[in-house]
Amino acid sequence: MEVAKTLDTRGMLCPMPIIKTKKVIQELQPGEILEVIADDPGAKEDFPAWCEQTGNELLKLEEKENGDIYVYIKKR
């Protein structure tokens, strides 16, 4: 998977990771992939819901042992 841009939102609480993601994904071309790194446990529910709302494709959501959550979103 080729990531076009990485957004680190660790230390931010809801809704900031989603707000930042919305802003950054607007800079990408359709089909490009955004990697978001978060540590807010709410991200596991927020990102799938946001992708469904916006039509962007959630490719993968993975929680690491240290609590970091990696989210891969393909821009529609």
Image (cartoon, rainbow, N blue to C red):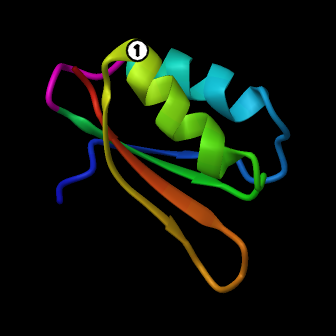
* Residue farthest along the bottom direction in this orientation: 65
Decide whether residue 29 is among the magenta residues: yes
Residue for point 53% across, 30% down? 49
Q: Which residues are magenta?
A: 27-31
Q: Quadrant of the C terminus?
A: top left
Q: Is residue 40 left or right of residue 46?
A: right
Residue 66 picture location, percent across and down: 71, 82
Residue 32 picture location, percent across and down: 20, 34
The kind of secondary structure element at disc 1 is: helix
Q: Is residue 3 left or right of residue 6?
A: left
Q: Is residue 71 left or right of residue 68?
A: left
Image: 67 above or below 56: below
Decide whether residue 55 is among the magenta residues: no
Nearer-the-camera pick, 40 or 48 = 48
Q: Quadrant of the N terminus?
A: bottom left
Q: Dividing the picture into quarters, in which one does residue 45 lie?
A: top right
Residue for point 54% across, 38% down? 47
Dot 1 amino acid type: Thr
Q: On the image, numbered disc 1 is attached to which residue?
A: 54
Residue for point 53% across, 16% down? 23
